[in-house]
Image: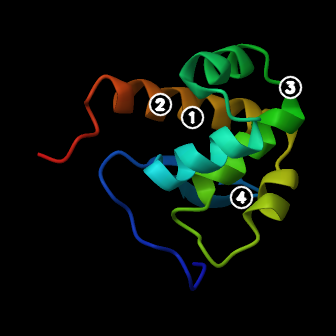
């Protein structure tokens, strides 16, 4: 286990990179980083970006959602090391976490 791991929280999604399990978490900080790294522009701009993701953009998105669970790790390097099949699986988890969050299913009870 990575020493800086911030622990599982309800709403986190699990992914596997190079045989190790990691968690993704959508936070306000992650949303701000996503917005900044994809040029700002608000929700409609981000929706357009998400519809046209290539592997590099998907790795950027992956890094933004890894960071809340691994704040002192080089998540950009970790995301860059993910294979195309791992990216595809991660995108499924990212879609799930975004959908559940914006439907209110990840809200604290």
The residue indicated by pointer 3 is: 54
| Residue, far bottom | 3
Task: Give the CA distance from mark 2 to mark 1.
Answer: 6 Å
* Percent of width and height locating residue 13: 47, 45
Tell me what residue is drawn at x 78 percent, y 53 percent.
79
Quadrant of the image containing the C terminus: top left
The residue indicated by pointer 4 is: 19
* Percent of width and height locating residue 45: 66, 19
Task: Give the CA distance from mark 3 to mark 4.
Answer: 23 Å
The reply to whether callout 3 and callout 2 are in contact (CB within 8 Å) is no
* Marks 4, 1: nearer the viewer: 1
* Marks 3, 4: nearer the viewer: 3
Task: Give the CA distance from mark 3 to mark 1.
Answer: 14 Å
Tell me what residue is drawn at x 56 percent, y 81 percent.
4
Q: Is residue 26 visible?
A: yes
Image quadrant assignment for residue 39:
top right
Other residues around mark 3 within 10 Å, as few (<14) / some (14–19) / many (≥20): few
Other residues around mark 4 within 10 Å, as few (<14) / some (14–19) / many (≥20): few
Query: In the depicted view, which residue is nearer to us: 57 or 47?
Result: 47
Q: Give above or below for 37 relative to 88.
A: below
The residue indicated by pointer 2 is: 98
Whichever of callouts 3 and 4 sits on the residue coming sooner in the sequence is 4
Whichever of callouts 2 and 4 sits on the residue coming sooner in the sequence is 4
Q: Is residue 15 visible?
A: no
């Amino acid at each position: 286990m990575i020493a800086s791991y911030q622990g599982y929280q309800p709403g986190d999604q699990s992914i596997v990179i190079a045989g190790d399990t990691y968690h993704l978490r959508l936070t306000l900080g992650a949303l701000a980083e996503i917005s900044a790294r994809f040029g700002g522009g608000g929700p409609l701009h981000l929706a357009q970006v998400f519809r046209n993701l290539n592997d590099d953009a998907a790795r950027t998105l992956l890094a933004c959602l890894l960071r809340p669970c691994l704040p002192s790790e080089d998540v950009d390097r970790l995301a860059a090391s993910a294979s195309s099949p791992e990216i595809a699986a991660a995108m499924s988890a990212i879609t799930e976490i975004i959908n559940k969050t914006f439907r209110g299913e990840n809200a604290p009870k």
